[in-house]
Image: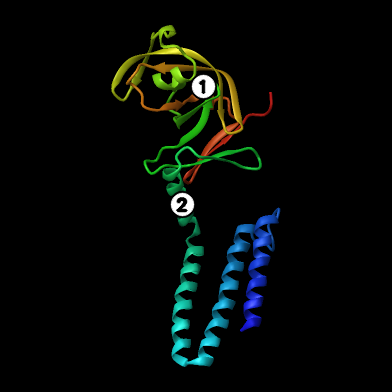
Amino acid sequence: MSGALGLGAILFGATLMVGLFAGGPVAGLSPNEVMAVGTLGATALVMTAWTINDFRHRWIDGVRALLVWSVVFAALVSGYVRRDELALVLDRVIGEIDPGRTVTTDTGEVVVARRADGSFTLAGHINDKPAHFVFDTGASAVVLTAESAAASGFQPQTLNFVVPVATANGRTLAAPVTIDRIAIGPIVERRIKALVARPGVLRENLLGMTFLDRLASYEVRGNRLILRRPPSR
């Protein structure tokens, strides 16, 4: 039993090292796939050793161990086969538990998970003040709530509500402003044309096209929104 357990521990440790430090495919498999296959192999070794040991003591214990480990192994195999579906569910859960949480990849892409209602919320900063945005390609400009605008340094008495806009509640007027700085993770854009909504008209800031058009690209892939910053100017 100790030999199989030791081999299982070595296999698990090796796959963990591959997952953490491999810079590319290994034997045609991605690091994540190597970790999954290695974990299944290590589990099979432990399962076999444990079951054989129980059979040596009492056959009924061996049968019980065989049944338990068979269920565990079948669950792991099923999880691996359906890993893409599980990843989508996990993204939705993350989007609800921590809405707006962004992840920056090694290449500088900003990734955020979709929320259960289908929207993407991104945490960022407006003029160095924390703010949340809803990704909205239907908005021709960045649009701020009255509260967010005030927190970011725009004085209500200086705003001139002269720009007609259409909202879910009908047409209204918004005030044009220029935001000094918007940051979403490592993506920072300056001097961005935006609009400020009247109090009570808008509940969330909209990350519209005056910001999105400056990016190198953006795309929705599955349950994830990916923003790519423009080349250094």
- Quadrant for the N terminus, please: bottom right
Depicted 92 relative to depicted 200: above or below = below
Mark 1 surroundings within 10 Å by alpha-carbon count, few (fewer than 14), some (14 through 19), many (20 or more): some
67 sits left or right of 30 in the view: left
- Kind of residue indicated by mark 1: Thr
Which of the two marks, 2 or 1, is nearer to us in this view?
Answer: 2
Between residue 3 and residue 178, name the one nearer to us: 3
- Quadrant for the C terminus, please: top right
**Label 2 vs 1, first from the N-terminus:** 2
Q: Quadrant of residue 111?
A: top right
Where residue 77 sits in the image (x, y, percent)?
A: 50, 68
Q: What is the CA distance from the residue labelled 2 to the residue labelled 1?
A: 31 Å
SS label for mark 2: helix
Q: Residue at x 49, y 16 (%)?
A: 153
Where residue 149 sits in the image (x, y, percent)?
A: 45, 18
Depicted 185 relative to depicted 156: above or below = below
Where residue 202 sits in the image (x, y, percent)?
A: 36, 23
Pointer 2: what residue? 90
Q: Quadrant of residue 56?
A: bottom right
Pointer 1: what residue? 210
Q: How many marks?
A: 2
52 sits left or right of 99 in the view: right
- Kind of residue indicated by mark 2: Leu
SS label for mark 1: helix
Depicted 34 relative to depicted 222: above or below = below
